[in-house]
Amino acid sequence: MVALIDRVAFEVFGFAIYWYAIIIVSGIVIAMWLSSREAVRVGLKADDVSDFMLVCLPIAFIGARIYYVLFDLQTYINDPIQIFNIRSGGLAIYGGLIASVIYLYFFCRRNFIPMWNFLDMAAPSVILAQGIGRWGNFMNHEAFGGVTTRGFLEKLHLPNFIIENMYIDGAFRQPTFLYESVWNILGFFVLIFLRKKNGWLKQGEVVLGYLIWYSFGRFFVEGLRSDSLYLFGNIRVSQLLSAILFIAAWVLLLWRRKKVSNLKNYDRSYGKNQYLI
């Protein structure tokens, strides 16, 4: 029998601390550190990032939970108290991102920060945090794909601890967490490379590039998962949203390039009080 990695990292006074929480928090801390460094380079303050995150984090977690509950509503109607039991899992990244962007709009308006500028600054850090966060799913034994064989996993040249931990519910599973993690981390390096090339990207195109990259990969990975949320029939919620975001990001990118005459380059020289389109 293949043993799974224990979800619990350690206990404090009998209270279990899960690897999932440790990894998610680590990804957030790294993202904040990277975003703070970039904020200074583009004319913002490092405090802008911490001030935003202080309020955004709980809002994002609430949004992620509401999104998950809404698309798995029958489960929670039968047992409503479980809505508040986030320690058992059930957070959807798209819900967190939607809630974060809504709050960011008001944050930027209140602090006179160009919203596109803030999004460009944060986007690479966000996709890196998502890549790190998928390892929380690995430790939590979730976000896995359909049944496969040990032989298939060995052909991927995966370390043995990953192979063994993909033995779930009596069968080996596709490591979809890993596929998305690798895709996201690769996307981080692609966005950083493009962002450093002054004149290559226009203002707002770093975050649009993030949406294009992430939604493209998420669409295909989601199709392999066996624990997806469904809208109706065989329509997976995250696949549908990924397709919408992918198309919308491309349309917006091309429209802005063609129609916005004063669109500026992402050159790390924006001023905080500039109102850019």
Image (cartoon, rainbow, N blue to C red):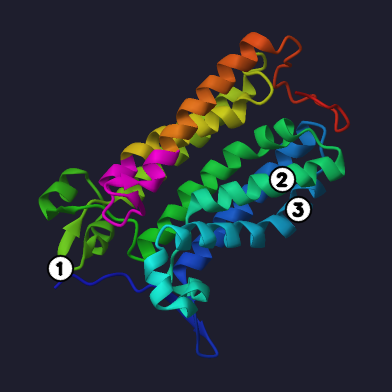
Q: Is residue 236 magenta?
A: yes
Residue 235, given in percent of the width and then of the height, sits at 32, 44
Choose between 67 and 210: the one closer to the eye: 67
At horizontal 46% and vertical 30% (from top left) the residue drawn is 246
At label 2, the amino acid type is Leu
User: Which residue is pictured at 53% across the width and 42% down the height?
Assistant: 127
Residue 266 falls left or right of residue 88: right
Residue 84 spot, x, y in % from top left = 53, 75
Q: Is residue 9 left or right of residue 168?
A: right
What residue span does the magenta drawing correspond to?
A: 221-241
Q: Which residue is found at the position 79% from the left and 53% from the top?
A: 51
User: Disc 3 residue type?
Assistant: Ser
The residue beneath circle 3 is 50
Provide the residue designation for mark 2: 104
> To which residue does mark 1 refer?
170
Q: Distance between the residues labelled 2 and 3?
A: 13 Å
Secondary structure beneath dot 2 equals helix
Judge the density around disc 1: few (<14), some (14-19), many (≥20) Cα neighbours within 10 Å.
Answer: few
Q: Foreground residue, 65 or 70? A: 70
Dots 2 and 1: beta carbons under 8 Å? no
Q: Which of 102 and 212 is in front in this view?
A: 102
The furthest residue to the bottom: 13
User: Disc 1 on helix, strand or loop?
Assistant: loop
Compared to residue 276, the image places residue 83 above or below, namely below
154 to 11, vertically: above or below: above
Which is nearer the eye, 161 or 23?
A: 23
Looking at the rendered structure, which numbered label has been put on residue 124? none
The type of residue carrying mark 1 is Gly
Q: Is residue 257 visible?
A: yes
